Amino acid sequence: MDKIIVHGGKKLTGEVTVSGSKNAALPILIASLLTAEPCRYQRVPNLADIHTTLKLLGGLGVKIDKQGWARGTSELTLQAEAVSKLEASYDLVKTMRASFLVLGPLTARFGQARVSTPGGCAIGARPVNLHLKGLEAMGARIEHSHGYIEATAVRLHGAKIYLDLPSVGATENLMMAATLAEGTTFIENAAKEPEIEDLASALNKMGGRVRGAGTDIVQIDGVDSLHGFSHEIIPDRIEAGSFVIASAITGGDVWIKGARAEHLDAFLIKLQEAGVVLSCDPGGIRVQRNGKIKSVDVTTLPYPGFATDLQAQMMVLMSVADGVSVITETIFENRFMHALELDRMGAQIQLEGNRAVVRGARELSGAPVMATDLRASISLILAGLVASGSTEVSRVYHLDRGYEYIEEKLSSLGAQIERVRA
Protein backbone atom coordinates (compact mmCIF):
# COMPACT_ATOMS: atom_id res chain seq x y z
CA MET A 1 0.00 0.00 0.00
CA ASP A 2 1.43 3.39 -1.03
CA LYS A 3 2.62 5.97 1.47
CA ILE A 4 3.45 9.64 1.13
CA ILE A 5 6.41 11.04 3.01
CA VAL A 6 6.62 14.77 3.68
CA HIS A 7 9.76 16.49 4.97
CA GLY A 8 8.53 19.70 6.59
CA GLY A 9 9.86 23.22 6.91
CA LYS A 10 9.81 24.38 3.28
CA LYS A 11 8.06 27.59 2.26
CA LEU A 12 5.92 27.10 -0.80
CA THR A 13 6.40 29.57 -3.64
CA GLY A 14 5.45 29.73 -7.30
CA GLU A 15 2.39 28.87 -9.37
CA VAL A 16 0.06 25.87 -9.34
CA THR A 17 -2.95 25.16 -11.56
CA VAL A 18 -6.20 23.87 -10.12
CA SER A 19 -7.63 20.72 -11.73
CA GLY A 20 -11.21 20.24 -12.80
CA SER A 21 -13.71 19.68 -10.02
CA LYS A 22 -14.27 16.06 -9.06
CA ASN A 23 -17.64 16.84 -7.49
CA ALA A 24 -18.78 18.64 -10.63
CA ALA A 25 -17.41 16.07 -13.06
CA LEU A 26 -19.09 13.02 -11.51
CA PRO A 27 -22.75 14.00 -12.09
CA ILE A 28 -21.97 15.66 -15.44
CA LEU A 29 -20.36 12.46 -16.72
CA ILE A 30 -23.38 10.51 -15.49
CA ALA A 31 -25.64 12.96 -17.35
CA SER A 32 -24.41 11.32 -20.58
CA LEU A 33 -26.98 8.59 -19.83
CA LEU A 34 -29.73 11.07 -20.76
CA THR A 35 -28.92 11.05 -24.50
CA ALA A 36 -27.82 8.65 -27.24
CA GLU A 37 -25.55 11.28 -28.78
CA PRO A 38 -21.83 11.85 -28.00
CA CYS A 39 -21.00 14.01 -24.98
CA ARG A 40 -17.58 15.66 -24.89
CA TYR A 41 -15.94 16.79 -21.68
CA GLN A 42 -12.87 18.92 -21.04
CA ARG A 43 -10.83 19.36 -17.84
CA VAL A 44 -11.83 16.00 -16.38
CA PRO A 45 -9.45 15.22 -13.49
CA ASN A 46 -7.56 11.92 -13.53
CA LEU A 47 -8.78 10.56 -10.20
CA ALA A 48 -9.83 7.24 -8.70
CA ASP A 49 -13.46 8.38 -8.41
CA ILE A 50 -13.51 9.32 -12.10
CA HIS A 51 -12.13 5.87 -13.01
CA THR A 52 -14.89 4.30 -10.87
CA THR A 53 -17.53 6.37 -12.66
CA LEU A 54 -16.19 5.34 -16.07
CA LYS A 55 -16.15 1.70 -15.00
CA LEU A 56 -19.77 2.03 -13.90
CA LEU A 57 -20.87 3.74 -17.12
CA GLY A 58 -18.89 1.31 -19.26
CA GLY A 59 -20.60 -1.57 -17.47
CA LEU A 60 -23.97 -0.10 -18.43
CA GLY A 61 -22.95 -0.08 -22.08
CA VAL A 62 -21.74 3.51 -22.47
CA LYS A 63 -19.03 3.85 -25.12
CA ILE A 64 -16.02 5.68 -23.67
CA ASP A 65 -13.26 7.36 -25.67
CA LYS A 66 -10.28 8.04 -23.39
CA GLN A 67 -7.74 8.95 -26.06
CA GLY A 68 -7.65 12.63 -25.23
CA TRP A 69 -7.65 11.87 -21.51
CA ALA A 70 -4.78 9.42 -21.88
CA ARG A 71 -2.70 12.07 -23.65
CA GLY A 72 -3.05 14.31 -20.63
CA THR A 73 -5.45 16.82 -22.19
CA SER A 74 -8.23 16.00 -19.69
CA GLU A 75 -10.71 15.27 -22.48
CA LEU A 76 -13.25 12.45 -22.56
CA THR A 77 -16.06 11.49 -24.94
CA LEU A 78 -18.99 9.37 -23.74
CA GLN A 79 -21.88 7.99 -25.79
CA ALA A 80 -24.80 6.13 -24.23
CA GLU A 81 -26.34 5.00 -27.52
CA ALA A 82 -26.36 1.30 -26.72
CA VAL A 83 -27.09 1.02 -23.00
CA SER A 84 -27.42 -2.70 -22.33
CA LYS A 85 -27.73 -2.82 -18.56
CA LEU A 86 -29.79 -0.79 -16.10
CA GLU A 87 -28.15 -1.84 -12.83
CA ALA A 88 -25.43 -0.30 -10.65
CA SER A 89 -23.95 -3.02 -8.45
CA TYR A 90 -23.03 -2.83 -4.79
CA ASP A 91 -19.33 -3.30 -5.59
CA LEU A 92 -19.23 0.10 -7.29
CA VAL A 93 -21.78 2.03 -5.23
CA LYS A 94 -20.08 1.10 -1.95
CA THR A 95 -16.79 2.41 -3.37
CA MET A 96 -18.25 5.75 -4.46
CA ARG A 97 -21.63 7.02 -3.35
CA ALA A 98 -21.97 9.24 -6.42
CA SER A 99 -22.69 6.03 -8.35
CA PHE A 100 -26.21 6.30 -6.93
CA LEU A 101 -26.75 9.27 -9.26
CA VAL A 102 -27.44 6.92 -12.18
CA LEU A 103 -30.87 6.18 -10.67
CA GLY A 104 -32.56 9.35 -11.91
CA PRO A 105 -31.18 9.44 -15.47
CA LEU A 106 -31.79 5.72 -16.10
CA THR A 107 -35.36 5.91 -14.82
CA ALA A 108 -36.06 9.08 -16.81
CA ARG A 109 -34.74 7.78 -20.13
CA PHE A 110 -35.38 4.03 -19.97
CA GLY A 111 -38.26 3.78 -17.50
CA GLN A 112 -36.41 1.58 -15.03
CA ALA A 113 -33.25 1.25 -12.95
CA ARG A 114 -31.83 -1.01 -10.27
CA VAL A 115 -29.20 0.59 -8.05
CA SER A 116 -27.56 -0.67 -4.87
CA THR A 117 -28.17 1.29 -1.68
CA PRO A 118 -24.90 2.97 -0.66
CA GLY A 119 -25.00 2.44 3.12
CA GLY A 120 -22.94 4.62 5.45
CA CYS A 121 -19.38 5.84 5.10
CA ALA A 122 -16.41 6.79 7.23
CA ILE A 123 -17.60 10.35 7.83
CA GLY A 124 -21.16 9.44 8.70
CA ALA A 125 -24.41 8.10 7.25
CA ARG A 126 -25.78 9.88 4.20
CA PRO A 127 -29.22 8.40 3.51
CA VAL A 128 -30.81 8.55 0.05
CA ASN A 129 -34.41 8.95 1.16
CA LEU A 130 -34.59 12.46 -0.33
CA HIS A 131 -33.65 11.07 -3.76
CA LEU A 132 -36.39 8.45 -3.51
CA LYS A 133 -39.13 10.77 -2.21
CA GLY A 134 -38.44 13.12 -5.09
CA LEU A 135 -38.62 10.38 -7.70
CA GLU A 136 -41.82 9.05 -6.16
CA ALA A 137 -43.33 12.54 -6.37
CA MET A 138 -42.45 12.46 -10.08
CA GLY A 139 -44.38 9.21 -10.54
CA ALA A 140 -41.71 6.55 -10.12
CA ARG A 141 -42.57 3.34 -8.35
CA ILE A 142 -39.84 2.59 -5.81
CA GLU A 143 -39.22 -0.87 -4.35
CA HIS A 144 -36.50 -2.09 -1.99
CA SER A 145 -35.22 -5.60 -2.66
CA HIS A 146 -32.12 -7.39 -1.36
CA GLY A 147 -30.15 -4.19 -0.77
CA TYR A 148 -31.16 -2.61 -4.07
CA ILE A 149 -33.50 0.20 -5.06
CA GLU A 150 -35.67 -0.64 -8.06
CA ALA A 151 -37.38 2.31 -9.79
CA THR A 152 -39.89 2.04 -12.62
CA ALA A 153 -41.99 4.59 -14.50
CA VAL A 154 -43.72 4.71 -17.88
CA ARG A 155 -42.64 8.36 -17.95
CA LEU A 156 -41.80 10.65 -15.08
CA HIS A 157 -43.93 13.75 -14.66
CA GLY A 158 -43.28 17.18 -13.23
CA ALA A 159 -43.78 17.74 -9.51
CA LYS A 160 -43.16 20.20 -6.72
CA ILE A 161 -40.47 18.68 -4.48
CA TYR A 162 -39.31 20.03 -1.13
CA LEU A 163 -36.00 18.71 0.21
CA ASP A 164 -35.88 18.49 4.01
CA LEU A 165 -32.15 19.19 3.69
CA PRO A 166 -30.35 20.95 0.81
CA SER A 167 -28.79 17.69 -0.35
CA VAL A 168 -26.33 18.06 -3.20
CA GLY A 169 -26.80 14.48 -4.41
CA ALA A 170 -30.60 14.60 -4.26
CA THR A 171 -30.67 17.94 -6.09
CA GLU A 172 -28.42 16.52 -8.84
CA ASN A 173 -30.32 13.24 -9.20
CA LEU A 174 -33.71 14.95 -9.39
CA MET A 175 -32.49 17.69 -11.75
CA MET A 176 -31.25 15.08 -14.20
CA ALA A 177 -34.42 13.01 -13.93
CA ALA A 178 -36.65 16.07 -14.38
CA THR A 179 -35.05 17.07 -17.68
CA LEU A 180 -36.89 14.22 -19.46
CA ALA A 181 -40.06 14.32 -17.34
CA GLU A 182 -43.38 15.49 -18.73
CA GLY A 183 -44.18 18.95 -17.41
CA THR A 184 -42.41 21.22 -14.95
CA THR A 185 -40.57 20.24 -11.78
CA PHE A 186 -39.72 22.58 -8.91
CA ILE A 187 -37.04 21.55 -6.42
CA GLU A 188 -37.38 23.69 -3.29
CA ASN A 189 -34.66 24.02 -0.64
CA ALA A 190 -32.26 22.85 -3.34
CA ALA A 191 -28.50 22.74 -2.82
CA LYS A 192 -26.78 25.90 -4.10
CA GLU A 193 -23.23 24.66 -4.68
CA PRO A 194 -21.25 25.76 -7.77
CA GLU A 195 -21.28 22.11 -8.83
CA ILE A 196 -25.09 22.31 -9.07
CA GLU A 197 -24.76 25.33 -11.35
CA ASP A 198 -22.20 23.50 -13.49
CA LEU A 199 -24.52 20.52 -13.88
CA ALA A 200 -27.38 22.83 -14.85
CA SER A 201 -25.12 24.48 -17.44
CA ALA A 202 -24.29 21.07 -18.92
CA LEU A 203 -27.94 19.98 -18.97
CA ASN A 204 -28.95 23.19 -20.73
CA LYS A 205 -26.25 22.61 -23.36
CA MET A 206 -27.93 19.23 -23.96
CA GLY A 207 -31.22 20.98 -24.68
CA GLY A 208 -32.56 20.89 -21.13
CA ARG A 209 -34.51 23.76 -19.60
CA VAL A 210 -33.12 24.31 -16.13
CA ARG A 211 -33.51 27.65 -14.34
CA GLY A 212 -32.62 28.85 -10.85
CA ALA A 213 -29.58 26.62 -10.23
CA GLY A 214 -27.51 28.21 -7.48
CA THR A 215 -30.66 29.40 -5.68
CA ASP A 216 -32.91 27.49 -3.31
CA ILE A 217 -35.58 26.89 -5.98
CA VAL A 218 -34.64 25.11 -9.21
CA GLN A 219 -37.18 24.90 -12.03
CA ILE A 220 -36.87 22.24 -14.72
CA ASP A 221 -39.19 22.20 -17.73
CA GLY A 222 -39.10 18.68 -19.12
CA VAL A 223 -38.34 17.97 -22.78
CA ASP A 224 -38.90 14.92 -24.96
CA SER A 225 -35.22 14.29 -25.72
CA LEU A 226 -31.73 15.64 -25.15
CA HIS A 227 -28.74 15.83 -27.49
CA GLY A 228 -24.96 15.67 -27.33
CA PHE A 229 -22.87 18.57 -26.11
CA SER A 230 -19.39 19.79 -25.20
CA HIS A 231 -18.60 21.07 -21.71
CA GLU A 232 -15.59 22.17 -19.67
CA ILE A 233 -15.68 21.22 -15.98
CA ILE A 234 -15.27 24.08 -13.46
CA PRO A 235 -12.09 24.27 -11.34
CA ASP A 236 -12.08 22.30 -8.09
CA ARG A 237 -12.79 24.74 -5.26
CA ILE A 238 -11.77 22.26 -2.57
CA GLU A 239 -8.40 21.63 -4.18
CA ALA A 240 -7.98 25.39 -4.53
CA GLY A 241 -8.80 25.90 -0.85
CA SER A 242 -6.30 23.20 0.11
CA PHE A 243 -3.54 25.06 -1.76
CA VAL A 244 -4.58 28.28 -0.03
CA ILE A 245 -3.95 26.56 3.32
CA ALA A 246 -0.68 25.05 2.06
CA SER A 247 0.68 28.49 1.19
CA ALA A 248 -0.61 30.12 4.37
CA ILE A 249 0.64 27.42 6.74
CA THR A 250 4.17 27.47 5.32
CA GLY A 251 4.40 31.26 5.14
CA GLY A 252 4.71 31.00 1.38
CA ASP A 253 3.73 33.03 -1.67
CA VAL A 254 1.69 31.00 -4.15
CA TRP A 255 -0.39 31.93 -7.20
CA ILE A 256 -3.25 29.43 -7.52
CA LYS A 257 -4.14 29.60 -11.19
CA GLY A 258 -7.76 28.95 -12.07
CA ALA A 259 -9.07 29.22 -8.49
CA ARG A 260 -12.40 31.04 -8.39
CA ALA A 261 -12.65 33.28 -5.34
CA GLU A 262 -16.43 33.59 -5.76
CA HIS A 263 -16.74 29.85 -5.01
CA LEU A 264 -14.81 30.24 -1.74
CA ASP A 265 -16.24 33.39 -0.15
CA ALA A 266 -16.88 32.12 3.40
CA PHE A 267 -13.57 30.26 3.49
CA LEU A 268 -11.51 33.21 2.21
CA ILE A 269 -13.15 35.62 4.67
CA LYS A 270 -12.04 33.36 7.53
CA LEU A 271 -8.51 33.17 6.09
CA GLN A 272 -8.31 36.96 5.97
CA GLU A 273 -9.54 37.16 9.57
CA ALA A 274 -6.69 34.79 10.43
CA GLY A 275 -4.15 37.16 8.90
CA VAL A 276 -3.65 35.58 5.48
CA VAL A 277 -3.07 38.06 2.65
CA LEU A 278 -5.16 37.29 -0.43
CA SER A 279 -5.15 38.88 -3.86
CA CYS A 280 -8.01 37.65 -6.03
CA ASP A 281 -8.81 38.23 -9.68
CA PRO A 282 -10.62 36.24 -12.39
CA GLY A 283 -7.41 34.34 -13.19
CA GLY A 284 -6.81 32.96 -9.71
CA ILE A 285 -5.80 33.71 -6.12
CA ARG A 286 -2.43 34.80 -4.74
CA VAL A 287 -1.81 33.70 -1.14
CA GLN A 288 0.77 35.25 1.21
CA ARG A 289 1.25 35.50 4.94
CA ASN A 290 2.53 38.34 7.08
CA GLY A 291 3.39 37.30 10.63
CA LYS A 292 1.61 34.84 12.89
CA ILE A 293 -1.67 33.15 12.02
CA LYS A 294 -4.48 34.23 14.34
CA SER A 295 -7.10 31.82 15.69
CA VAL A 296 -10.63 32.12 14.29
CA ASP A 297 -13.81 30.18 14.98
CA VAL A 298 -15.40 28.21 12.13
CA THR A 299 -18.79 26.56 11.65
CA THR A 300 -19.41 24.37 8.60
CA LEU A 301 -22.65 25.04 6.76
CA PRO A 302 -24.27 24.22 3.41
CA TYR A 303 -23.07 26.42 0.55
CA PRO A 304 -22.51 29.38 0.53
CA GLY A 305 -21.34 28.73 4.09
CA PHE A 306 -17.95 27.34 5.11
CA ALA A 307 -17.54 24.02 3.28
CA THR A 308 -17.30 20.86 5.35
CA ASP A 309 -14.76 19.62 2.80
CA LEU A 310 -12.37 22.37 3.98
CA GLN A 311 -12.88 21.80 7.69
CA ALA A 312 -9.96 19.36 8.15
CA GLN A 313 -7.58 21.66 6.28
CA MET A 314 -8.66 24.63 8.40
CA MET A 315 -8.11 22.61 11.57
CA VAL A 316 -4.47 22.10 10.59
CA LEU A 317 -3.99 25.84 10.14
CA MET A 318 -5.61 26.53 13.52
CA SER A 319 -3.30 23.92 15.07
CA VAL A 320 -0.37 26.30 14.55
CA ALA A 321 -2.30 29.56 15.07
CA ASP A 322 -1.94 32.04 17.91
CA GLY A 323 -4.74 31.42 20.40
CA VAL A 324 -7.73 29.10 20.74
CA SER A 325 -10.29 28.38 18.04
CA VAL A 326 -13.55 26.42 18.03
CA ILE A 327 -14.46 24.44 14.92
CA THR A 328 -18.08 23.27 14.76
CA GLU A 329 -19.08 20.58 12.25
CA THR A 330 -22.79 20.68 11.36
CA ILE A 331 -22.85 18.63 8.15
CA PHE A 332 -21.45 15.20 9.08
CA GLU A 333 -21.51 13.59 12.50
CA ASN A 334 -18.18 11.79 12.33
CA ARG A 335 -15.76 14.10 10.58
CA PHE A 336 -13.13 14.74 13.24
CA MET A 337 -11.16 11.51 12.88
CA HIS A 338 -8.18 13.46 11.55
CA ALA A 339 -7.95 15.27 14.91
CA LEU A 340 -6.55 12.18 16.62
CA GLU A 341 -3.83 11.86 14.00
CA LEU A 342 -2.99 15.57 14.26
CA ASP A 343 -2.64 15.13 18.03
CA ARG A 344 0.04 12.54 17.31
CA MET A 345 1.96 15.32 15.58
CA GLY A 346 1.73 17.64 18.57
CA ALA A 347 -1.55 19.41 17.90
CA GLN A 348 -3.73 20.25 20.90
CA ILE A 349 -7.29 19.41 19.92
CA GLN A 350 -10.11 18.61 22.35
CA LEU A 351 -13.23 17.04 20.87
CA GLU A 352 -16.61 17.88 22.38
CA GLY A 353 -19.33 16.24 20.31
CA ASN A 354 -19.55 18.17 17.04
CA ARG A 355 -17.10 20.80 18.31
CA ALA A 356 -13.31 20.76 18.28
CA VAL A 357 -11.44 23.16 20.54
CA VAL A 358 -8.04 23.80 18.95
CA ARG A 359 -5.22 25.38 20.97
CA GLY A 360 -2.48 26.62 18.72
CA ALA A 361 0.79 24.75 19.26
CA ARG A 362 4.23 26.29 18.95
CA GLU A 363 5.07 23.68 16.34
CA LEU A 364 4.08 20.30 14.99
CA SER A 365 6.47 17.39 14.66
CA GLY A 366 6.58 14.70 12.02
CA ALA A 367 5.10 11.29 12.85
CA PRO A 368 3.63 8.20 11.19
CA VAL A 369 -0.08 8.95 10.62
CA MET A 370 -2.98 7.25 8.86
CA ALA A 371 -5.57 8.84 6.58
CA THR A 372 -9.18 7.93 7.37
CA ASP A 373 -10.97 9.71 4.50
CA LEU A 374 -10.31 11.98 1.54
CA ARG A 375 -10.16 15.36 3.28
CA ALA A 376 -8.39 13.92 6.33
CA SER A 377 -5.63 12.70 4.02
CA ILE A 378 -4.85 16.16 2.63
CA SER A 379 -4.97 17.63 6.15
CA LEU A 380 -2.19 15.28 7.24
CA ILE A 381 -0.06 16.26 4.27
CA LEU A 382 -0.63 19.93 5.08
CA ALA A 383 0.44 19.25 8.67
CA GLY A 384 3.54 17.50 7.34
CA LEU A 385 4.46 20.58 5.32
CA VAL A 386 4.82 22.69 8.46
CA ALA A 387 5.99 20.00 10.91
CA SER A 388 9.59 19.53 11.93
CA GLY A 389 11.12 16.31 10.64
CA SER A 390 9.34 13.78 8.43
CA THR A 391 5.69 12.76 8.30
CA GLU A 392 4.67 9.41 6.83
CA VAL A 393 1.05 9.28 5.66
CA SER A 394 -0.40 5.83 5.03
CA ARG A 395 -3.66 4.76 3.33
CA VAL A 396 -3.23 7.45 0.70
CA TYR A 397 -5.68 5.72 -1.63
CA HIS A 398 -8.17 8.11 -0.03
CA LEU A 399 -6.10 11.01 -1.37
CA ASP A 400 -6.12 9.61 -4.89
CA ARG A 401 -9.91 9.84 -4.95
CA GLY A 402 -9.87 13.63 -4.98
CA TYR A 403 -6.43 15.20 -5.58
CA GLU A 404 -4.84 14.96 -9.00
CA TYR A 405 -1.02 14.67 -9.09
CA ILE A 406 -0.80 16.18 -5.59
CA GLU A 407 2.85 15.22 -4.99
CA GLU A 408 3.94 16.72 -8.31
CA LYS A 409 2.01 19.92 -7.70
CA LEU A 410 3.37 20.44 -4.19
CA SER A 411 6.89 19.54 -5.33
CA SER A 412 6.69 22.20 -8.05
CA LEU A 413 6.10 24.75 -5.26
CA GLY A 414 9.16 23.63 -3.33
CA ALA A 415 7.71 21.01 -1.00
CA GLN A 416 9.85 18.02 -0.19
CA ILE A 417 7.35 15.24 -0.71
CA GLU A 418 7.49 11.78 -2.25
CA ARG A 419 5.30 8.76 -2.80
CA VAL A 420 6.70 5.42 -1.69
CA ARG A 421 5.09 2.60 -3.59
CA ALA A 422 4.53 -0.61 -1.72
Image: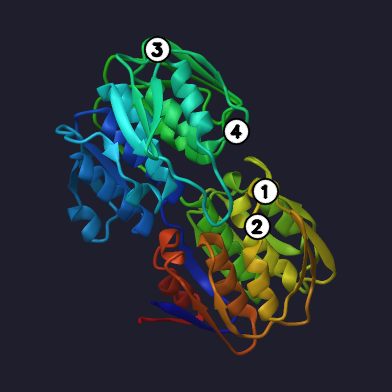
**Pointers 2 and 1 in contact (CB under 8 A)?**
yes
Q: Secondary structure at mark 2?
A: helix
Residue neighbourhood size for the residue with mark 2, other residues' Cα within 10 Å, grouped as few (<14), some (14–19), many (≥20) = many
Check the image and name the residue furthest to the top: 183
Q: Amino acid at mark 2?
A: Gln
State how far apart marks 3 and 2 are (Cα): 39 Å
Residue 384 sits in quarter: bottom right
Residue 306, label in figure? 1
Residue neighbourhood size for the residue with mark 1, other residues' Cα within 10 Å, grouped as few (<14), some (14–19), many (≥20) = many
Q: Earlier in the sequence, mark 2 or mark 1?
A: 1
Q: Earlier in the sequence, mark 4 or mark 3?
A: 3
State how far apart marks 2 and 1 are (Cα): 8 Å
Q: Quadrant of the C terminus?
A: bottom left
State how far apart marks 4 and 2 are (Cα): 19 Å
Which is more toward the observer, 365 or 386? 365
Which dot, 1 or 3, sits closer to the camera?
A: 3
Residue 166, label in figure? 4
Side of 214 relative to 86 (left or right):
right
Q: Which residue is mark 3?
A: 157
Q: Amino acid at mark 3?
A: His
Check the image and name the residue furthest to the front: 146
Q: Amino acid at mark 1?
A: Phe
